[in-house]
Amino acid sequence: MLSVLVTFFPHRLDVHLDARGQKDLFPNTASFISRCHKIANEARGLSFLGKELSIYDAATSYLLAVSGDSALRQPKSKLYLDECLSILRNLGIQKGANSTIGFAANFPGAQYVGLSEPPETLIAQQMGRRIFWLCWANGRSLQQATFGNTEASAFPEILSAPLPPLPLEIDDIYISADYIALQPAGIVSEIVGFNAKIRLHRSYEALVLNDLILGNGGRIDLAYQRQLAGQALASCKHIIDGLPVELQLRPHIDTSESDSDIHLDDAVLDLNARAVNEMSPETKRKIQYEVQKADIIISQLGTRLHIITKYCESSETNMEIDRILRDLSMMLKYICRLNLEPNGASLIPKLNRIITTLLSRQGFTSTFQIDDPMAFRDVLAAMQHGETVTGNNTEC
């Protein structure tokens, strides 16, 4: 977990060590992450796969995969992810939805579905679903960031196996080993944003399936492909429109909120644990919403761009390109850019493709005029160098 935190907040480690006069312990983030990997692997042992495995082994493999390389582009990261998926498969998390139902019947939404045997606990069940869909989303994001070149080869385990249900939209505090309580009314679970991102990535599953059919010798039907692309774009819009207001970009409201109320403040940036712990639960939750909001917006922009560039002819994309440009400009204007940082490493490939494609205007024209085209690249450059991203319109 520490190595993952440093991966997502790379310059926080320097701040933390400098404040304690321990900078010499780890000259850079890579040395810290390498040390964490070494400790984790030594703790598991060389023969851990030969032991009785649990969902926590899958979680460890996933954390090893994303620590140091949250974009999952290094061979070692993919090996760890394959290891995670193998453990999940052996635990039965990917089995079909027609398995026995009835575990934890005291809560209708909590029955286990897709397991040959009941999970050890409901905590393990929900962990398994969350980890699987994290792996799945990473595979789909990688496919988008590489212009579709890895569609048939990235994470074949995920593409070929049945999909488990999405995790319940209930926060951890309400999930125990043998019982899941209802999410309190009026409090949006953190899993709502997680599931929304998964649904966005699944919006064009029919197109992916069509690609696989064509790859096996099928003939392309352009009219049918355009129909599927239109349905996928409509699905993206429907998913965003259906989000609770806490996860929607609302310019007329977001600009009136106080910075200290919804944005990461200096106490958080300086890793002042005491100050963070003294935050009210409501403030922490609002910060989480803002971080998720940025992730959801970029995910849906990347998904829409992927659909039109891969599946639509250039003459059909102009209107959607206008919408994407307008939405991207609005996001950079109203989203606090510090809230992009927790997912920065995984968002960079998406932003890179979105910004590069839109600014190059290759194969299409747009009537939407960008006020400050270089602001797009400034955001990307700052995120790539691990800097705190700031700007006149979105200072926190």
Image (cartoon, helix red, strand yellow):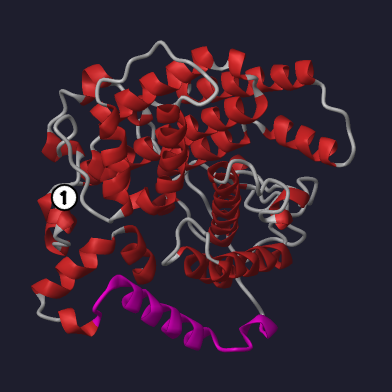
Instruction: Please say if 55 is above or below 389.
Output: below
Amino acid bearing label 1? Met
Residue 90 seen in the figure: yes
**At which x and y percent is residue 299?**
47, 37
The foreground one among 179 and 170 is 170
Looking at the rendering, in which quadrant would you find the N terminus? bottom left
Q: Residue at x 47, y 42 (%)?
A: 194
Q: Quadrant of residue 32?
A: bottom left
Residue highlighted by disc 1: 279
Instruction: Please say if 255 is above or below 37.
Output: above
Q: Residue at x 23, y 17 (%)?
A: 252
The foreground one among 330 and 129 is 330
- Are there few (<14), some (14-19), or many (20+) residues within 10 Å of tag 1? few
The foreground one among 163 and 219 is 219
Tell how many labels.
1
Q: Residue at x 30, y 71 (%)?
A: 29
Residue 288 seen in the figure: no
**At which x and y percent is residue 291?**
32, 42
Within the magenta stretch, is there residue 273? Answer: no
**At which x and y percent is residue 207?**
71, 31
Query: In the structure shown, which secondary structural element does the residue marked by tag 1 occupy?
Result: loop
Magenta stretch in the rendered image? 26-51
The foreground one among 89 and 308 is 308
> Which secondary structure is most common in the magenta stretch?
helix
Locate residue 92 relative to residue 243 in the image: left or right: right
**At which x and y percent is residue 152?**
73, 48
Looking at the rendering, in which quadrant would you find the C terminus? top left
